[in-house]
Image (cartoon, rainbow, N blue to C red):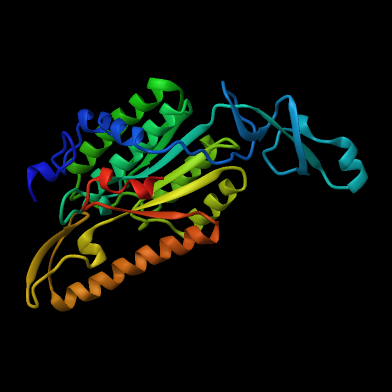
Amino acid sequence: MLKSDLPLFSDGINITEKELLACQNIARALPEKRAKAKANLAGHRSSAIKGRGMEFAEVRHYQSGDDVRTIDWRVTARTGKAHTKLFVEERERPIIILLDLSHSLYFGSSLLLQAVQAAHVATTLGWNAILHGDRLGAIIATEQEHIELKPRSRQQGILQLVSAIKQLHQRQLNAIAAQEADPEHMLNACKRLRRIAKPGSLIWIVSDGRHFSAACLAMLSDLKRHCDMGAFLITDPLREGNLVLPKHFKLPVKDGGKERIIDRHSYEHWLQNQHKIKAEFTNMMQKISVETRFIDAGKRLNQQLGALR
């Protein structure tokens, strides 16, 4: 790997403020594309969002979390079931990023640690939100701690994200050999996410998919009823089986703080497990109709713009 292959200001292991600020250039290269929201927000421009406002859109069944002030009592009385009114209005949308910086992402065989690529993806999504005038918040999760960032507008939103990623990444590097303190840390992150994600938010999940359980799926399924959601799965060439390796080899591998030596036989077994983890996460997202996009830590993010669109 040549130094020129690395993203601007990056060494592939550490994270600097400069390299995260440079992700703004990648965000500017993305086309303007906005998904439809599902509930009431507040802001400064007209969009296809349905919520409280001046222009009536439709009536639908009342759902938990809807504003009781929008209940259509005539339709409710006629049908015997609670219905609520939706309106078209001017809105500024909350974008919330669930960023996984678990120890399993501190692995890299080619260009970047998966954690560094995850940070680049999250920051690029953050910049894209800010450039479109949305409010930006995040939950950043590790085995030892979580950082919760409530949605904020403009520079405040992106700067709090950049600062939190940089600090938490460094703490993870310093504690790379530490044992997992909380095996349900991702479930706890999903609980926090459910608390701060208001109806109508757009949620982005950035992870390697290893720590999502059935309990996490239940939390995300509940959120998906009132929020839009998408997922980015961070992969690595060695974990995908995309590296050309000799027929006979012994390769030292440090995976999430655990060291091992793998040969051809143990690598094939290890690789099957990596594919299983990827498939389980993808299937989990499919169950709640969430698209999973794949980002390779062995390539610069600006070479994978198609996955970000």
Quarter residue 71 falls in: top right
Q: Is residue 29 left or right of residue 116?
A: right
Determine whether 282 is above or below 102 in the image: below
Residue drawn at x 51%, y 60% as measured from the top left = 286
Residue drawn at x 44%, y 46% as measured from the top left = 188
Which quadrant, please, contains the C terminus? top left
Residue drawn at x 77%, y 29% as measured from the top left = 69
Q: Can residue 270 be seen by looking at this rendering?
A: yes
Q: Residue 107: x, y in percent?
A: 20, 54
Q: Is residue 216 left or right of residue 16?
A: right
Determine whether 234 is above or below 59 in the image: below
Q: Residue 176: x, y in percent?
A: 19, 48
Q: Can residue 146 be seen by looking at this rendering?
A: no
Q: Residue 233: x, y in percent?
A: 36, 54
Q: Residue 81: x, y in percent?
A: 84, 47
Q: Nearer the viewer, residue 125 or 26?
A: 26
Quarter residue 165 falls in: top left
Q: Is residue 30 left or right of residue 13?
A: right
Residue drawn at x 52%, y 50% as measured from the top left = 220
